[in-house]
Amino acid sequence: MDNLTHSLTGALAAKLLENKTNTKVDAKQQRALFWLFVVCANLPDLDVLLGLWGDPIFSTKHHRGLTHSVLFAPIMAVLPALLWCRFTVSIKIPPASQQIPPLRGVRGVFLRITKSLLSRRESSRSASPLNSNDTSDISLAPLKGGIHEASSLSSMIPEPSGPPQRGSREGAQSAMKAFARFYFVALAGVLIHILFDVITSYGTRLLLPFSETRFALDWMFIIDPFFTISLTVMLGLGKLMPKRRKLLVSVAAIFVVSYLAAEMLCSRLAHERAQQALMRSNIKAGKVSALPQPLSIFKWKALAQTEDAVYQAFFSLWDKAPPRFTKFENASDDFVTLALATAEVQWYLTFARHPWIRSTSQGEHQIVELMDLQFSIDEALINALGASERPLPFIMRLVFSRNGELLRSDFSESVILRANQFNGPP
């Protein structure tokens, strides 16, 4: 999913939290929580920086990898929580001179006993007229001009009990509460990002580092302008109309849940129609997918993988006629056999959901290409939009000489291996 939509979903979650804690958190804290939600709703996509390493396979291999794992999310949320706690929370700690620790332990027990005995002795002496002039238990307290005043010994012993004084311990507790609040917000933001990636078709490895399995619900196309624009309008109106902000935020949340529910229903219907069309066409497929298409939740693409071909059909849920499949047959010559033995192609087959293999001859070279048809777009839609047709992304290409020597291989138009220099095809 695009990062604008990720930011909007994070902003919506922050506003929902603000509605719940409006009277408990001040305005500064609310702003801090809002931006923490927005940042963490984009944080897992930091894996795109792996493309700076220059290896085209490395960045694709690790995209939606560990940073998108639900098992790694609790670890990833620690750093932004610490940063927000460091720069947005101020804990006031009294100076050391004002921090009087309570008297506890052996010293506290001794002082309690001593004070109790002295208090009893003073009370008995004050009650007896014979000892009214006894000054054995009287101490002198200094007054102005060097004159001394008598005071009881018991009044000079400090109180060993009482509540703890405010100090570093209270400051540490406040800091821990602030960190916990920021941590759970950061974790929620990361998990929201992962959720909205899983509903697309690309595939997300949720269980890394223990499993390489890619999970995809196939509900939403990677970019959905209707969803993004609608959410933008509702959140924008909430910003412009403060008195109705809570209502508009609630409406936005209901819209998101309803939209996802509608996409889930359409996905199930599309998959059922694809299965029925395959049965009518007597196509026995090992893998069947119904993938969403851009600009409408009713537009879908069916893909069916067999041992020797990939079948593809574009259709709408409103169509009365069943989907009609186009067959893309896999090449199976000696050059394909050589290509399948390479490490890069072995990796590509684990990445692609519906790989199609073709082999073509160009001059003195034989080119083997592998492409994932899950990324294909309906030509009718492209023509309707007036856009120019572009090649599929994530194409693996291997160039062989006539004697079977691998001369060059590239992925997504980036060279990954060059054994010899030659003036071959681009």
Image: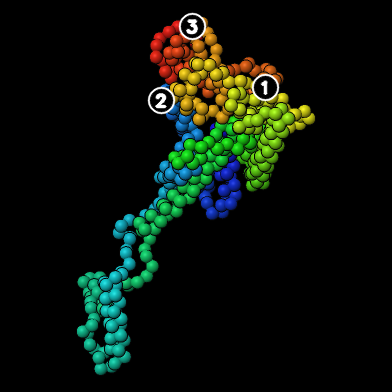
Q: Which residue is mark 3?
A: 364
Q: Nearer the viewer, residue 227 or 34?
A: 227
In the displayed structure, 20 sits above or below 155; it is above
Q: Which residue is mark 1?
A: 326
SS for dot 1: strand
Give the spatial CA distance, label 3 vs label 2.
Answer: 33 Å
Residue drawn where x is 69% and y is 40% of the image: 265
Q: Please, which residue is most extreme toward the right here? A: 320
Residue drawn where x is 64% and y is 28% of the image: 303
Q: Nearer the viewer, residue 163 or 384?
A: 384
Q: Amino acid at mark 1?
A: Thr
Q: Which residue is mark 2?
A: 53
Q: Nearer the viewer, mark 3 or mark 2?
A: 3
* Label 1: few (<14), some (14–19) or many (≥20) C-alpha neighbours in 10 Å: few
Q: Is residue 112 left or right of residue 41?
A: left
Q: Is residue 318 left or right of residue 66?
A: right
Residue drawn where x is 70% and y is 20% of the image: 380
First in sequence: mark 3 vs mark 2: 2
